[in-house]
Image: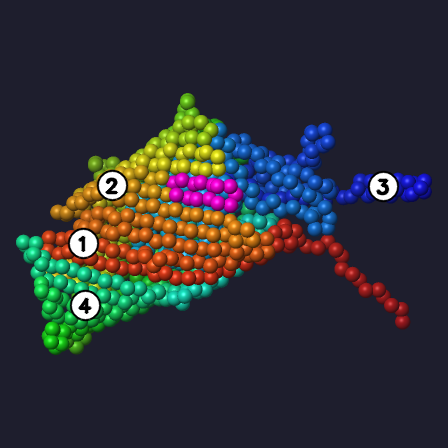
Amino acid sequence: MKNLFTLSLILLAFALQAQKNTPAIGRVYGKLLEATTKEPIAYASVTVFKTLPSGKDSLIGGALTIENGDFNVTALPMGAFKVRVSFVGNQDLVKPIKISPPNNLEQDLGNLLMAVDVQTLGTVEVKAEKATTTMNLEKRVFNVDKNLSAMGGTAEDVLKNVPSVTVDMDGGIKLRERSATIYVDGKPTLMSLNQIPSDQIESVEVITNPSAKYEASTMGGILNIVLKNNRKPGYNGVLSLGLGNQDRYNGGLNLNLNKDKWSISGFYSINNSNVPSLAYVYRTGLTSAALVQDYYNQNSVVTNRNFFQTGRLNVDYALNNRNTISLAGTVSGGAFDFSVAQNYESLASNRQITNYGSRQTLSENDFTRNSLDLQWKKTYATKNKSLLAILNYSWGDKTNTSNWNTTGFDAQGTSLATYPQLVKINDASNNDQVLFQLDYVNPLNDSTKFEMGLRSFWNARYQNYFFKPFNAELNDFIVDTQFSQDANISESINAAYFLYAGRLKHHISYQAGLRFEQSNLTGISHLENQPDFGYTYPKGWGKEFFRSLFPSIFLSKDLGQNNALGLNFSRKIQRPNPQQFMPGIKSNDKQNIQIGNPALQPEFIDLAELNYNKIFGHNNWLISLYLSNETNTIKPLTLPSETDPTVLVTKFVNGTNELTYGIDNTLKLAFGKNFDVLFNSNVFRFNVNVDTFSNSGWAANGKVGLNYRLPASFSLQLNAAYEGNRPIPQGSRQGIAYMDFAVKRSFFKNAANLVFSINDVFNTRKDITTLTLPTYIQESMRRRDTRYFKLSLQIPFGKADASLFKKSNKKPEVPEMQEF
């Protein structure tokens, strides 16, 4: 027994001596980001400590985060410790770690999200499992990896489920019923939403009333699509695959490589679909006495075939802790083709057929969209002081060939004299744009700062659109110059802005800004009988000069730890887009055509908001009262053709004004750790005056998103939306209701995900509009998508190890020399 006790003491002594001689080779590292903006936090304190039996903390090691938010604490001994991250004005983070051989010598804490202390700055974050919805008075951030139904889709599928956002049947994006400006990583883009894969989107930032810092054309707000860029040390990536009905398939590969001062990321994606849908037009003709004169019915079968490819490469190089250069390139291209088979009939007032026929339409479209981005960011020792320079060059082209073949027969089946009618359309355009932007932020002290910047945008577009009906006498397709365009269009916008922000007594903060924009658009037409077009603002130093000034004023008051109130005002401009300018026919309907208007001028808008943000527990409520007044508003106007009154022509014009006001609510509720709900409602009223037509009325939109986490790594998601009945300038639009459903199964400790989704579960998402004119009442229905099913798989891979690419210090083995 005595020998056993002695042996135990000897073994214990050896163990203590071994522990004492254990080298301090442990390491902990990661990245610190601000929870709301995902911006890196520099100069935060990172300490590693051990709690002693007495309850006191013993410091083991520490470091400061660098400019890009990275931190690295080395020379740590073996054992269990805690890491505390601290930064003034933010809530501390504490993470437990354990350093032990052989597999736990290095601990990667990943991206740590630090929340602002609401007692200090009044920002509110709603916390849930990983990807959360963050809301404050400036903007709302919606993280995309929570959107299961959009997995394997495009940015359009993502935005369809974002609160306050609606997607029309043409793919147009509206925020509170106004056309929103789309940014990608904070910059304008030539890419369409269908060219941006949803699997590469990190989050969507919603800014309903941008300040003078942003371009003045953001009258409908900004939707900033933030792409994924994983900066964990080592390499990592995600492989995505998807397969569904309607020939839907997609694939994508995302790769990230981070070593020392270099960060390289890129992705490639492919997306295909072949979507059939139905459409109709039912029209009743009226006499001057409002009696039925005739009827026109048309039914269509539409097939949309889409194929897109997108690739992107981004390289960041840290010159030092305070200077980073980034270079990114994006290439994309594809085709969007469609075919339409229409059958129509005209009937007398007694519903007897007077004539009938059909139209076959085939349209083939190809495009390319490319861009290069160069960015330099400099930070200073002063907290939050920075200088950012951006240079972007984007270019692309598009070609379109369309053929129309229309037949017409009388009631007895005899071909009408002017039929068949053949039309060929040749459309080609190329676009080059350059953007330069410089932003400087300088905090004067803890409560005040000023920002200033310059922005120059130049866009050159060559538009070649020839509408060519077949001339039987000449036996050839002849250009109709009335509906064609051959023009060079150049646009330039030069801007400068200044912002000053400060804090007053009684927890009141303010921000005042002024932006000046000089804009010019010149269209030089190469067709006879078509005049040149365009506009210039300002034209002089009088009234026009003040129309080029765009002020913004923001006030906020902290009402306590969990409440904040904000009031803001801004002035905006909306310039006509190329489709609104171009006179070419954009419809394939025999009795309804749409043309542009080169004489269009910009519209102006005054926008005001009153916001209230409240947090209670893990829940958040953001309510907004808003008011906007548009002058010279750009709106579509539909009138009978002067040459053929049976044909309705829709043309964009400058109306008198539109006044809109409403209330927008977004409510985030978390019921424990496994169930959360996001509600949104937007109730508004508008009054619009266009030409001799005016209309007003109330309308409402609503959305709800439910997420429920089940046992066995299953998750369910339900997204439902309703866009209520509403008046339009010349009639009304029926309400639209639809729902998406998805179920996810996670594997390998939530590393891989398999998602089954049903989009538009009840197949109800269709646009039905009633047009009311003195001589016609017309109901039309069209769709963009129909119900589809999809199975998507995401597989991450990689090794988050900063020492992955370090050279080995191990000397190569030298073979022994043998004697002979």
Please tell me the numbered disc located at residue 12. 3
Q: Which of the 4 image quadrants contains residue 762?
A: bottom left
Please tell me the numbered disc located at residue 818. none
Measuring 34% from the left and 61% from the top, which residue is drawn there?
Answer: 786
On screen, residue 384 versus residue 436, left or right, reads right
Q: In this view, does 335 lie above or below 162?
A: below
For label 2, the residue is: 685
SS label for mark 2? strand
Please tell me the numbered disc located at residue 771. 1
Label 4 neighbourhood size at 10 Å, few (<14), some (14-19), many (20+)?
many
Label 1 neighbourhood size at 10 Å, few (<14), some (14-19), many (20+)?
some
Q: How far apart are marks 3 and 4 (CA)?
A: 96 Å
Amino acid marked by disc 4: Tyr
Instruction: Tell whether label 4 touches label 3 (CB within 8 Å).
Output: no
Measuring 30% from the left and 49% from the top, which residue is drawn there?
Answer: 723
Q: How far apart are marks 1 and 4 (CA)?
A: 19 Å
Amino acid marked by disc 1: Leu
For label 4, the residue is: 344
SS label for mark 4? strand
